[in-house]
Every structure is written in C-alpha cells, then in structure tokens.
Image: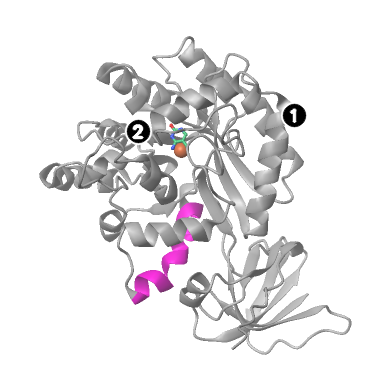
Amino acid sequence: MLIKNIVIENSAEITDIRIKDGKFERISKDISPLSGEEVIDCKGCMALPPFVESHVHLDTCLTAGDPCWNLSGTLFEGIECWAKRKEKLSKKDIKERAGKAIRMQASNGVQFVRTHVDVTDPTLIAIEAMLELKQDLKDIVDIQIVAFPQEGIMSYPNGEKLMENAVKMGADCIGAIPHFEFTREYSVESLNFIMKLAEKHNKLVDVHCDEIDDEASRGLETLACRAYEYGMGEMVTASHTTAMHSYNNAYVSKLFRLLKMSKINFVSNPLVNTHLQGRMDTYPKRRGVTRVKELLEAGINVSFGHDDIFDPWYPLGTGNMRDVLHMGLHVCQMMGYEEILNSYKLITHNGAKTLHLSNYGIKEGNPADFIVLNADNFYNALNEKAAVLYSYRKGKLIASETPSIKKVLF
Ligand code: 17E
Ligand code: FE2
C-alpha cells in the first residue's frame, strides 16, 4: 500500500510512505505505485504515530450516576461512590463498558492504553476481566494493566496479598495510592512494598501519587528515591502529583534534583484534576494540576492522561486525547506558538516513553501504526478539532472519520 502526499508530524515537507507486511517499508518523496498497489492520497494532511492514553481507569468508565452522583466533586466522594458500584461488578459488565470505551478511544486515534484496574476487591474480578479484554482486542489496541489499590495497600484488608495475586495473574504494572493510606508511615511502607514487588517480578510501576491538595503529602520523594536507588527510574511513573502544585518553591527546587537523578516519568491528568482539586479552598481556588511546564523544562518526561471517562470522578468524556491536551495547555499555561505546535508529544511520544513501548513512531522498519489528521500541522489540527481521517494499525485500517460539513447561511 502506498500513502501519497503526507506530512509526518510537523515536518515542512510532503512525503510518501510505502507499507508492506504491516510495516513502514519506505518513507521518501515521490514513490511511484507498483502495478496493482493500493494508493491513498492524503493531499498534504498530517500523519502522527497513534495517540497514547497513558492513564485511564477502564474498569470504572461509563458508570457516572450509578448508583450515585459525586456531588461534592472530590476524589474522596468518588471513591465512596465507586465502592458502592463495585459491589455490583460482573465480568460481563466490566468487559462491555471497557470495550465500549476502547472503541470510543479507537475512533479518536488511540492505539496504546495504560489502564489502572482496582484490586481492592477480594474477588479481583476486574483484573480478570481486563486481562481477557486485553487478549480479545490485541489486534486493535495495546492495553497495559496496572494493579491499582484504590482503597490502599496497608489500609485495606489483605492489601499486600491482593497486589501479589494481581501480579501473578498477569498485571503489567504495579500501582499504589500513598496519599490515601491511613498514615504517613503506611504511605512510605506501601511504596517500599511495591518497589520490592516490582523489582522481584521485573514489572513497571505507576503510582497515584499525592493526588491531594495537602502540601505536606510527600509520597513523590519516597517513590523517586526508591526508583533512584533501585536504578528503575525509567520503569517508574508518578501519576497526578497534584500536591506539587501546592509545595513551597524552596522544597520544589530541592526535589527537582532528585526527580532528575531518578529519571522517573510523570503523568498529569488535567481534565480530571482541574475538576477534583481545590475543592476545599475558598477563594482563590488552586488549580491543583502538577507543575508540567517546569518538569518539561527540567528535561523530565511528562505525558497527559484522560484518567476517567464518565465515571464517579469525571462526569464527561468521550475518550478523546485532544480534549485532555486542550485543557492541559490552558491550565498549565503552555500556550506559546511552538508549545501548541509541538504539544502532540504529550499524547504521543512522551506517553510511549512512559509505557516503555518499543518500535513506536513513523520510521522505516516499525509496525505501520499511524493516524492521519485532517490538517497540515498540529497547531491547526488542535485548534480546528480536525477529524482523525484514518487510524491504521500494522497497515490495516481500524477506524476512519468523514469530516463534517458546516454551513453558514449568510
Ligand atoms: N481513583 C483515584 O484515586 N484517583 C483518580 N483520579 C481516579 C480514580 C480517577
Ligand atoms: Fe487515576
């Protein structure tokens, strides 16, 4: 198959791409079609590697209002609502909802997903269901599963055993929730526990870390320190880190030295944390989104995640990473021309680094995974909410969109 007249990422040049046996065989200008070869003319539109959803909860998605709405808009009321919904879980229910959300994501150009899955449930039914779905949909999407202890590890009955069992069942990645543990001591113990578990089983780590407006919440320094000491930084991710919004600047400047040395990744979830944080504030109300701009300036890897799609923690969402990016750029004040132009990296390459993907990107020899946006560069794609014209996976079309036609009658 030959893709003609395409712009790769924000390149100034138009090029062609030949795909053979599911891989990018050749990327170069003016490739002539072979006899009988399928040719797709992209007319100067842009190609990107597929969007990476580096942080979402697929086991909880599409449950908002069932059995109750989160009226305070806090993380903690969300956890209470979810604990009630959890009692009704069945494998069929989880697979149907998560499958629907994955199709929504696919229609928006996502092909790589890291999902946190709640393991604070003696049946571990959600992990079982998500492991099955991962297999069922492996030709459409790469799913990475995090064993996520929503109600804590040290503070939940048999918390450590449930984590170990989830890893044995096949979770790819190990989570924690230090700010939700009963005490600061438990918070540190939980991080020590998961880092040992990850080292033993050679697993990735992704912690819901300091997702609270408490400036004294210091899980991050413990996580980064252990990651540094184990030499595992690139396999470790700190998600949310919203307390960093409220840390004093003197502490942050000390902390950044360790963060850089540790090489850990960050995921910020600007849609959800703009909604959940600052809820105990009067005016002025803190935004509670972590220091994305400063982390990036320090050379630290940061990606954006959607976190929730219509569930107890976020009442909206269609699985579109460009909604996440749009909010993130505003809230983090990253609105310079180059910042917007290059912002796609927050939902592509940076997420791929966090997920430890190999062979990601539009390069000769890589799997032919890519999307085509109906725009000539990413600044315009974001601003115009350009259609995802095609999403190809290993050279096979898995989603497409016809641009809508708007009419102004004057
Ligand atoms: N659970 C949690 O602890 N934090 C979140 N942001 C979500 C679930 C969505
Ligand atoms: Fe989350």
For residue 323, above or below residue 280: below
**One can see residue 400 in this view:** yes
Check disc 1 and give the amino acid type: Lys
183 falls in the magenta region: no
Magenta segment boundaries in residue numbering:
337-352
Of the pair 315 and 22, the residue shown nearer to us: 315
At mark 2, the secondary structure is helix
**Image position of 323 (left or right of 398):** left
Q: Which residue is mark 2?
A: 230
Instruction: Note whether ligand 1 is within 8 Å of mark 1.
Output: no
Residue ID at (56%, 25%) = 167
**Image position of 283 (left or right of 153):** left
Instruction: Note whether ligand 2 is within 8 Å of mark 2.
Output: no
Of the pair 65 and 365, the residue shown nearer to us: 65
Of the pair 273 and 351, the residue shown nearer to us: 273
**Residue most toward the top?**
157
Where does residue 78 sit, x and y in percent of width and height? 46, 30
Residue ID at (34%, 26%) = 178
Where does residue 235 sit, x and y in percent of width and height? 44, 41
Check disc 2 and give the amino acid type: Tyr
Q: Which residue is mark 1?
A: 92
**Residue most toward the left?**
250
At mark 1, the secondary structure is helix
Its colouring scheme is: one colour
**One can see residue 200 in this view:** no
338 falls in the magenta region: yes
